[in-house]
Amino acid sequence: MKVVLGVSGGIAAYKACELLRLFTESGHEVRVVPTREVLRFVGEPTWAALSGNPVTADVWDDVHEVPHVRIGQRADLVVVAPATANTLAKAAHGLADDLLTNTLLTARCPVVFAPAMHTEMWQHPATRANVATLRERGAVVIDPAVGRLTGADTGPGRLPDPAEIFQVCLRVLRGRPRDLAGHKIVISAGGTREAIDPVRFIGNRSSGLQGYALARTAVARGAEVTLVAANVSLPDPAGAAVVRVGSTAELREAVLAASEKADAVVMAAAVADFRPASRHESKIKKTDGEPDPIHLTKNPDILAELGRLRREAGAGPRVIVGFAAETDDVLANGQAKLARKGCDLLVVNQVGEGLAFGTPDNAATVLVAGGEPVEVPRGPKDDVADAVWDLVAPRLS
Ligand code: CTP
């Protein structure tokens, strides 16, 4: 595929070198189109050597090849990373004063922007309006990550991990529809932990891979994603707002708060059904006799609560999706759970045989309230996630 990597003038440009390598090493032909400003951060020889293609920021070079039109016309994907506030503004208003902005006007392929800037610039009403305009026109604008910025300050504005931007681009290149654009989606991922004492907990084997795949694919399909992650040690998916939690109580609070304004909620987290009735304030010591039993108490069922709130108050997310890992009587148990929890879709996994926990692949049966079950064949968790969105998207429109 022919990829145009637009790079605009931020310090995060050095991370675009890594993104460029990911594209070239996976067989894509990349033409780098920098702005004049970014060449002060990372010079032309770096972009030319890494891409194996000539590099210019100017419309006046190689005029006989009409580059200001050709590069955009030939592209299968244009990704601008980092995209500065200035580049976003020019793109939103159709200005064309350098090769990159000309390319953006002539491209008819999907366009992905990965903004990086200081928090104040990202939150400024002018930038918010420009981002909204670009999204309305169908561009994918990946929300910046939260973290350390240039200098001592922290906040939203960091360029996401290049590997994660690359994943979004691959999904966009695969031609998935942008059918979640304009929708707010909450996804829970990972597994909750319930403290026994300051050093021990009751937990489960969920890695968070399926929840993160749901977040990554939803971003590529245009959604605004809040990812509530319980004890997950994976890199943040580009473009998702990540809220970190530990226990079921924390997960419940974060999910319910984010769900108030959400269009869909997907509970992919493995939630502990029980917690110790009391938490020891200090570490439990070995004693000579029999150990004291740990008494358990029930945790609230968050999925069922979401369903109940919607039923009783008539408010809340339009689509509620649950997950269930089952070992026996998979379909019968799943159907009963779908009804009990009051959700619209239940993604049922059979556990075992190299599937589910910690593995890259998954297979599922999606049970549909009032409809026929849908089989999702074994495949990468991103594909399973897309199959879930294929069922969610029509229910949102
Ligand atoms: N779930 C939840 N709150 C809980 C337990 C589970 O929100 N306290 C959600 C999970 O995130 C998942 C779905 O409910 O989406 C099904 O989880 P599962 O553990 O399979 O359901 P249980 O009701 O606990 O059923 P089981 O008796 O099979 O454990």
Image (spheres, rainbow, N blue to C red):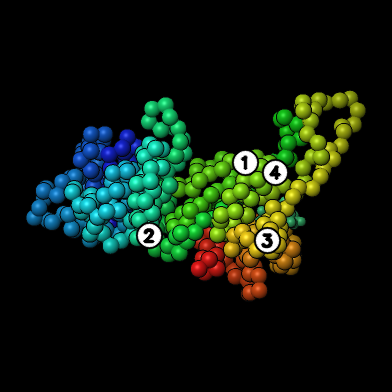
Give the foreground label among 4 and 2: 2
CB atoms of marks 1 and 2 within 8 Å: no
* N-term mark: 4 or 2: 2
Residue receiving disc 4: 249
User: x%, y% of residue 185?
Assistant: 54, 55
Question: Residue visible at 67% across and 50% down?
Answer: 270
Residue receiving disc 1: 245
Residue receiving disc 2: 136
Q: Quadrant of ligand 1?
A: bottom right
- Using the image as rendered, state which of residue 97 and residue 314 is in the foreground: 314
User: x%, y% of residue 313?
Assistant: 68, 61
- Mark 4 and mark 3: Cα distance apart in space: 22 Å
Mark 1 belongs to which amino acid? Val
Mark 3 belongs to which amino acid? Ala
Residue receiving disc 3: 313
CB atoms of marks 4 and 2 within 8 Å: no
Give the foreground label among 1 and 2: 2
Question: Residue visible at 41% across and 38% down?
Answer: 119
User: Would you say 327 lies left or right of 388 here?
Assistant: right
